[in-house]
């Protein structure tokens, strides 16, 4: 957990923050984001790299703050034991980047929360995206968490995993 005395791991000017606020709208089309980012001003390559690094630092702090807040919420409001709250999975930038490695185009039978669907929660959680990565590499078969039997066991293979296996076989 963070403390009040910890320094923020990023520094972004008010001008850059205001401009960046215009590009974080989730529904904004990519081409408009690019146009807005180009208006950041006459920045050198080094200045853009620095801004990007600072932006990543800000995102990492938001990620950590969200994790901390949700764990505290689980403990205080849902009476989850703190050891169990520490096990909760959360999307992260690392998980999202790892999830890109195995994302496939949606296919029939693929659930909206599939670990192989780009941008889903499971695709962006480090533990799940790593499991999906290991399964994609043939370490085990990946099962869908929907359609469980009476004992809570999966009844079918994941459609995203199956599609990735076919794609990899075609590339071999």
Image (cartoon, rainbow, N blue to C red):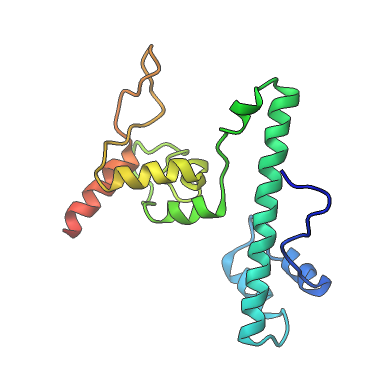
Rendered residue at 67%/82% (across/down): 47
Q: Quadrant of residue 35?
A: bottom right
81 w.r.t. 11: above or below = above
Screen quadrant of the N terminus: top right
State the residue in front, 44 or 162: 44
State the residue in front, 93 or 4: 4
Residue 119, position in %: x, y? 50, 49
Residue furthest top in the image: 150
Residue 55, position in %: x, y? 67, 66
Q: Is residue 24 visible?
A: no
21 w.r.t. 122: above or below = below
Horizontal arrangement in the rendering, residue 95 relative to residue 40 (left or right): left
Residue 5, position in %: x, y? 83, 53
Number of numbered callouts drawn:
0
Q: Quadrant of residue 155?
A: top left
Horizontal arrangement in the rendering, residue 146 relative to residue 48 (left or right): left
Residue 116, position in %: x, y? 39, 46
Q: Is residue 92 visible?
A: yes
Q: Quadrant of residue 82?
A: top right
Rendered residue at 58%/71% (across/down): 31
Rendered residue at 34%/43% (across/down): 160
Screen quadrant of the C terminus: bottom left
156 w.r.t. 33: above or below = above
26 w.r.t. 88: above or below = below
State the residue in front, 11 or 169: 11
């Amino acid at each position: 957990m963070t403390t009040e005395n910890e320094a923020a791991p990023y520094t972004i000017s008010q001008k850059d923050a205001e401009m960046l606020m215009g590009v974080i709208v989730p529904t904004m089309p990519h081409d408009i984001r690019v146009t807005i980012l180009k208006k950041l001003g006459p920045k050198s390559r080094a200045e853009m790299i620095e801004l990007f690094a600072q932006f990543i630092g800000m995102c990492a702090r938001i990620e950590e703050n969200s994790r901390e807040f949700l764990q505290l919420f689980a403990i205080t409001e849902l009476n989850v034991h703190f050891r169990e709250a520490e096990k909760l999975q959360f999307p992260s930038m690392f998980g999202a980047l790892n999830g890109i490695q195995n994302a496939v185009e949606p296919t029939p039978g693929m659930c909206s929360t599939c670990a192989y669907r780009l941008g889903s929660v499971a695709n962006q959680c480090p533990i799940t995206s790593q499991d999906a990565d290991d399964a994609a590499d043939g370490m085990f078969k990946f099962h869908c968490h929907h359609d469980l039997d009476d004992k809570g066991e999966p009844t079918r293979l994941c459609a995203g995993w199956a599609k990735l296996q076919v794609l990899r076989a075609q590339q071999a």
